[in-house]
Image: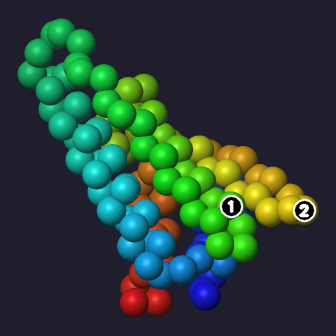
Amino acid sequence: MSQLNLNLIQGSVRINFDPEAAQDLQKHIASLMSSLKASAIAAGERQSRPEPKATMEYRYSDGIFFEVFCNPNIYPSPFAAKVLLTIKDDKIRLTSEAELTQLREDIDRYLESNG
């Protein structure tokens, strides 16, 4: 299992992560970004409120618990969106925010070096 480096808004964290799980997370992120882009386009074309979008929740647990959560209804575009990351095991729990675009870059970089 390889190390995934996640750049947070302040600092970074490194966790053991499986490449197949990274591909799954990459798909979740792509879907979320598409949803946010569609909402931004729709908001620019009309004055009414956009349809509420489902939250994105991704969970991974293999030695550690890793969760990524994002509510796309509170961000005007994918470039403004942030995700809440929770990483925990039996000794430590870390909860922090990261920019969605930075998370996507971190996953892409991890897959390039482990693909």
Foreground of the two, 107 or 91: 91
Which of the 4 image quarters holds residue 5?
bottom right
Q: Residue at x 42, y 36 (%)?
A: 55
The answer to whether residue 61 is left or right of residue 40 is right
- Above or below — where is 40 with respect to 15? above
Write down the residue under mark 1: 65
Q: Residue at x 18, y 37 (%)?
A: 38
Give the quadrant of the C terminus: bottom left
Q: Is residue 41 left or right of residue 64?
A: left
Residue 109 visible to an observer of this rendering: no
Write down the residue under mark 2: 91
Residue situated furthest front in the rendering: 62
The picture places residue 46, in percent across and down from the top left corner, at: 11, 15
Front residue of this view, candidates 16 and 59: 59
Quadrant assignment, res 88: bottom right
Q: Gap in Å between the C-alphas at discs 1 and 2? A: 12 Å
